[in-house]
Image (spheres, rainbow, N blue to C red):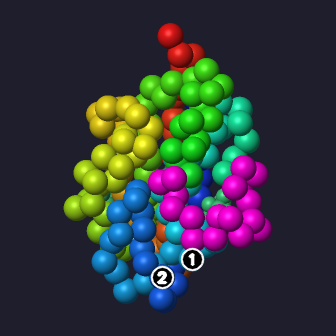
Amino acid sequence: MRVGHGFDVHPLVAGRPLVIGGVTIPFERGLDGHSDADVLLHAVADALLGAAGLGDLGRLYPDSDPAFKGADSRQLLRDVARRLAAAGFRVVNVDATIIAQAPRMAPHMPQMVANIAHDLGIPGDWVNVKAKTTERLGFTGRGEGIAAEAVALIAPQA
Ligand SMILES: Nc1ccn([C@@H]2O[C@H](COP(=O)(O)O)[C@@H](O)[C@H]2O)c(=O)n1
Ligand SMILES: C[C@@]1(CO)OP(=O)(O)OP(=O)(O)OC[C@H]1O
């Protein structure tokens, strides 16, 4: 068994959709980035890559590469899942936390979990998504951006 950790931050800006866990969430601003800036899926992907010793998202899908401009992070996550399988690993479970003062994430979590489980090819109860504010402290508390952390456990395929 191997464990990995992922972390990501994206700024909140006007004129962008807010896409988190593959869910487009109604809000007055969205996350900025080279891809769709899905901060939760990026943290999950980096946790999986870390557990497998396969580097990180930025090295595999550079934000300098026009091919990933506007990329759907669910496609990136599915590609990461393929890389893990090719390396002989299976996903045991994923646990993630969205760090955001707003909007409320709870209503959207079931769909986020379903998206992640589907893209990783695992049961939904092997995926957990939480959300926390920072009690208005720091850049997340001021609404300047959203962060996410994730941990993943993987094991050799049977
Ligand atoms: N962006 C967020 C933040 C929090 N939640 C939910 O609220 C609960 C309490 O969070 P605190 O940070 O105030 O302790 C948390 O357990 C989440 O269920 C949310 O939905 N969206
Ligand atoms: C997702 C990628 C794709 O170019 O770009 P961004 O959307 O900028 O996201 P980030 O987490 O900053 O970097 C990872 C990149 O792989």
Kind of residue at badge 1: Asp
**CB atoms of marks 2 and 1 within 8 Å:** yes
Q: CA distance from mark 2 to mark 1?
A: 7 Å
11 over 3 or under it: above or below: below
Toward the top, the furthest residue is: 158
Is residue 68 rendered magenta in the image? yes
| Residue 130 in the image, given as x and y percentages of width and height | 36, 51
Q: Is residue 57 left or right of residue 115?
A: right
Q: Is residue 115 visible?
A: yes
| Residue 56 in the image, given as x and y percentages of width and height | 69, 47
Task: Name which quarter of the figure residue 134 lies in.
Answer: bottom left
**For the point 58% across and 42% down, which residue is it?**
80
Is ligand 2 within 8 Å of the beta carbon of the residue shown at mark 1? no
Toward the left, the furthest residue is: 107
Tell me if mark 2 has few (under 14), some (14-19) or many (20+) residues whose alpha carbon lies within 10 angstroms of its own.
some
**For the point 65% across and 64% down, which residue is it?**
68
| Residue 69 in the image, given as x and y percentages of width and height | 63, 70
Q: Could you say which disc has been placed on residue 16 in the image?
A: 2
Q: Could you say which disc has been placed on residue 112 in the image?
A: none
**For the point 22% across and 61% down, which residue is it?**
107
Q: Which residues are magenta?
A: 58-75
Say what secondary structure mark 1 lies in.
loop
Is ligand 2 within 8 Å of the beta carbon of the residue shown at mark 2? no
Is residue 69 rendered magenta in the image? yes
**For the point 53% across and 48% down, which residue is it?**
77
Name the image quarter holding the N terminus: top right
Q: Which residue is disc 1 drawn over?
A: 32
Q: Is residue 83 left or right of residue 54?
A: left
Q: Quadrant of ligand 1?
A: bottom left
Q: Is residue 45 left or right of residue 30?
A: right
Say what secondary structure mark 2 lies in.
loop
